[in-house]
Amino acid sequence: MKKTAVFPGSFDPFTVGHESIVRRALPMFDEIYISIGYNSEKKSFFPLDQRLNWIRKIFSDETRIHVESFSGLTIDYCRKVGAKYILRGLRTSADFEFERAIAQLNKSMYPEIESVFLLTVPEHTPINSTIVREVIRHGGDASKFVPAAIDLSGYIKKKEI
């Protein structure tokens, strides 16, 4: 039986921390679905198609990775793709508390699902999509926080000093 994991998130944008989690998880799973959750109530900074294309480009060398979007509950999406694992990265103890609560609710709704947590490498601990978006919004250079395949040049505003 295939070991399939879903790595869900908004990935707005996908960071070097996200990439690290996926690459480090590859030896554990036969396939990983990097799945962008669609929330009509939330305004994204980067268009969904752009985020999907960037992630596909990052992992173009890896046939075991699938990049998709979904709406609704993550566990329903897991059932759809046959995943028994949800992959999550943890940067801080606050992340753990938040992710633990979600994992326990998911488990109660879908007993076959297991949540797998990987700690970020120390140098990625301060990096998150919200901070990266703020750097971009204010004209900063966010290139070291995102994989090299992500070209942010069309999104960087000129600094006003």
Image (cartoon, rainbow, N blue to C red):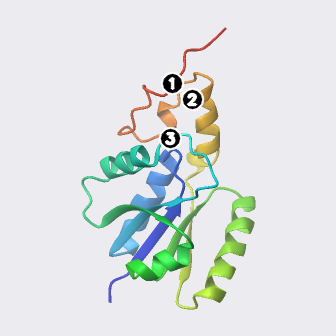
Identified by mark 3, the residue type is Phe
The residue that disc 3 covers is 46
Q: Secondary structure at mark 3?
A: loop
Mark 2 or 3, nearer chain start? 3
Identified by mark 1, the residue type is Ile
Q: Is residue 23 left or right of residue 86?
A: left
Q: Is residue 44 above or below residue 105?
A: above
Residue found 39% across the figure and 33% down from its top: 151
Q: Which mark is residue 40?
A: none
Q: Nearer the viewer, mark 3 or mark 1?
A: 3
Residue found 48% across the figure and 47% down from its top: 14
Q: Quadrant of residue 81?
A: bottom left
Residue 30 or 57: which is nearer the viewer?
Answer: 57
Residue found 55% across the figure and 82% down from its top: 114
Q: Which mark is residue 156?
A: 1
Mark 1 or 2, nearer chain start? 2
Q: Secondary structure at mark 2?
A: helix
| Cβ atoms under marks 1 and 2 closer than 8 Å | yes
Residue 39 or 78: which is nearer the viewer?
Answer: 39
Q: Which mark is residue 136?
A: 2
Q: Nearer the viewer, mark 2 or mark 3?
A: 3
Residue 83 visible? The answer is no
Number of numbered tags placed on the structure image: 3
CA neighbours of label 2 inside 10 A, class few (<14), some (14 to 19), many (20+): some
Q: Is residue 35 above or below residue 83?
A: above
